[in-house]
Image (cartoon, rainbow, N blue to C red):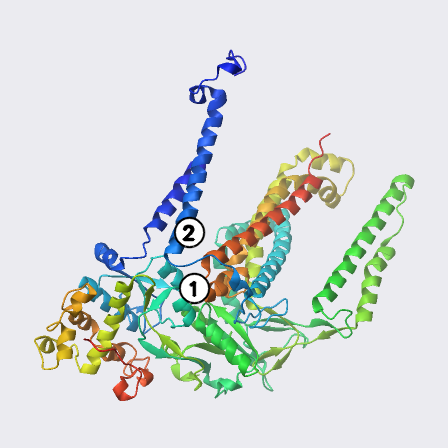
Amino acid sequence: MKTSFVLGALAVAGLAAGAAYAGTLDDVKARGTLNCGVSTGLVGFAAPNASGEWEGFDVGMCRAVAAAVLGDANAVEFVPTTGKTRFTALASGEVDMLARNTTWTFSRDVDLKFEFTGVNYYDGQGFMVPSDLGVSSAKELDGATVCIQTGTTTELNLADFFRSNNMSYEPVPIETNAEAQQQYLAGACDVYTTDASGLAATRATFENPDAHVVLPEIISKEPLGPLVRHGDNNWGDIVRWTLNALITAEELGVTSANMAEMASGTNNPEINRLMGTEGTLGEMLGLDATWAQRVLAVGGNYGEMFEANIGESTPIGLARGLNAQWKNGGLLYSPPFR
Amino acid sequence: MASRSHPDAGSFRLSMLINDTRYRRVTFQIIALLLLCLAVGYLISNLLTNLSAAGLNISYDFLAEPAGYDINQRPIEYTSQSTHLRASIVGVLNTLIVAILACVTATVFGVIAGILRLSKNWLVSKIMAVYVEVFRNVPVLIWIIIIFTIMTASMPAPKAFRGANAESSMLFDMFAFTNRGVYIPAPQFANPLFENGLLNWVLVIAFLLLSFLGARALGKRASAEQASTGQRPTTWHLTLSIWVAPIGALMVIMGLYFDYPALKGFNFRGGLQIRGSLIALWIALAIYTGAFIAENVRAGILAVSRGQTEAAAALGLRPNRVMNLVILPQALRVIIPPMISHYLNITKNSSLAIAVGYMDVTGTLGGITLNQTGRAIETILLLMLFYLTISLSISAIMNVYNNSIKLKER
């Protein structure tokens, strides 16, 4: 009994000691796969499809990084994480990066020692109610029962919103989006609140989406983005510039369709630097020259990924809105590739 | 070993630590202890190294900061501006509420099912056998989810109570069964003696406790009189007044009235809401553990030899007195020790509350607080300390009880 305890403790200690904090790039290369933390299932962002393959907007981000680092968009081990387990998974080294619609906040960045590598979706918290409830504004929700995913910033926003409007509510904390959906549809809560994109994604999976409305109020800023651990700046740079490459490609008009043509050399030096035909940007990252080409080959540029997974032609039907390029009145603005 | 010739105490050689059975035992224990200390020390130093490598530290300062989140079931005053510490206390109280409710109910279920399983009535004993086998062989988490799902899916939503010809109506205009929980009338005091609502209830419990002690003293005196004179005095009217008069007077003084639930806005307001999550957790833990307790009770009764029953019957005792005076007191000696571990299990299993969103201490301190502050190690240590304290307390109390009923050896 005592010996088995000692052996077990040693084994655990060995595992814990293996979780290194630096050299994530080398770890990933040595392992041959990228461990990417995603949500447990949010259609459009990260969910397994009918044949069991993960797909979605956040999944695309994971695949892009895998393509840049390993040259294979499928060399990704997807680790489903809940709102509660995601940070522990990242901090302990169980995943190399987290692409799980996680809001960039001060305390997560500074206190939890994570590094947000950019924003891949500008979101805000909204409310969804059944249309027959007859509510047209979130200000009318005094006394309502609200389903909410526990362990998220939405929980704090919700408390603040109701307090600042002098309203009362009854929170029903729920672990995952799927359970929340079940509770909401059964009428155990009047309102479901989460990020507006999540509401749209959830509503799209309902049998009768038209019987539910998303209220116009957006009560918070939720910049969602991929994140990595503090202390490995090179790895953080790779994830950051993979995202920037996707955004820049859209800005410069590089798509999956015209990529081969662009890669053979253009008159635009920034496209050339992005494609690796000019300069040594890839080497500076610790990758090869054509890393960005592989990133774009996965699912196209940012705009293509957006349209394919969550855009207006999909059941989720999100408009670009804040997530349009800065030239089109959105907030997407990548630092230049030079 | 005593027969072996002992070497002199003075001629101790180092090799005897291995070769001499008298020392070998101690040697190995010391080696094992050293290894254990080394392993624990390594784990701790590994943790500290990794924490400092990640730039983290261990600090409990977060407990004094505002929690920022709301909790639905609040036994004590709590708002989103209260501290994380207060949120944890709310969680602790919620854990204790469900644990106590489930322990009491499981005991009732278990004792009834255990005795009925020994019934001579074939149907009754088989039904109880099915209950025991079905409930203890399916994980308790599944039962929690099944009951919760049944509640939310089959009970009407509050809006079904609305309108002139509503689909659902309240029972006696007092009770409302909805998929958000059961609403019952709440006892309130018009002129409470204390500002703090909780203290009034402490007072009520104190009165009930005094009545209990009074009634017991009366019963003892009656038994003493019966022993000396052979005549038991009639005490039921005295007992009744001891129970009713003090508490009745207190209720009149404090002005007891009932606050009935009524549909207002989205939900029922007023009254006392027993949330679906509490009901699901409570019932699931009670029926699940009740099935185990039933087997303990059955084992305890079967452990009392048949001769005892027959001897008691030969003395002319009626069957229910045989059970109460002869069999159960002896069976309790077998029943109580495993019962302790079932009570501990209920308390620990209550941490499955998160499956239905019941805000116990695992949900507040180990869930939302952990998440919002990121202080995983600190909160988990606190949680471990809490469950350890509660478990050891239950053990201690039950051991005292066990000592009082166990066979007195003279």
Can residue A45 be seen here? The reply is: yes
State whether residue B123 is above or below residue B185.
above
Left or right of A294? Residue A195 is right
Q: Position of residue B212 (x, y in %)?
A: 79, 54
Identify the element where label 1 is drawn.
Answer: loop
State whether residue A253 is above or below residue A8.
below
| Callout 1 amino acid | Lys
Most distant residue in the right direction = B229
Between residue B199 and residue A223, name the one nearer to us: A223
| Callout 2 amino acid | Leu
Q: Chain of mark 2?
A: B
Q: Locate the C terminus of chain B and report the quarter of the image it occupies.
A: top right
Q: Position of residue B85 (x, y in %)?
A: 57, 63
Q: Which residue is mark 1?
A: A84
Q: Position of residue B121 (x, y in %)?
A: 62, 48
State whether residue B320 is above or below residue B207.
above
Q: Which residue is mark 2?
A: B48
Residue for point 47% across, 20% down: B21
Left or right of B390? Residue B186 is right
Q: Position of residue B60 (x, y in %)?
A: 52, 59
Please tell me in which quadrant of the rendered image residue A29 appears.
bottom left
Q: Chain of mark 1?
A: A
Most distant residue in the top direction = B5
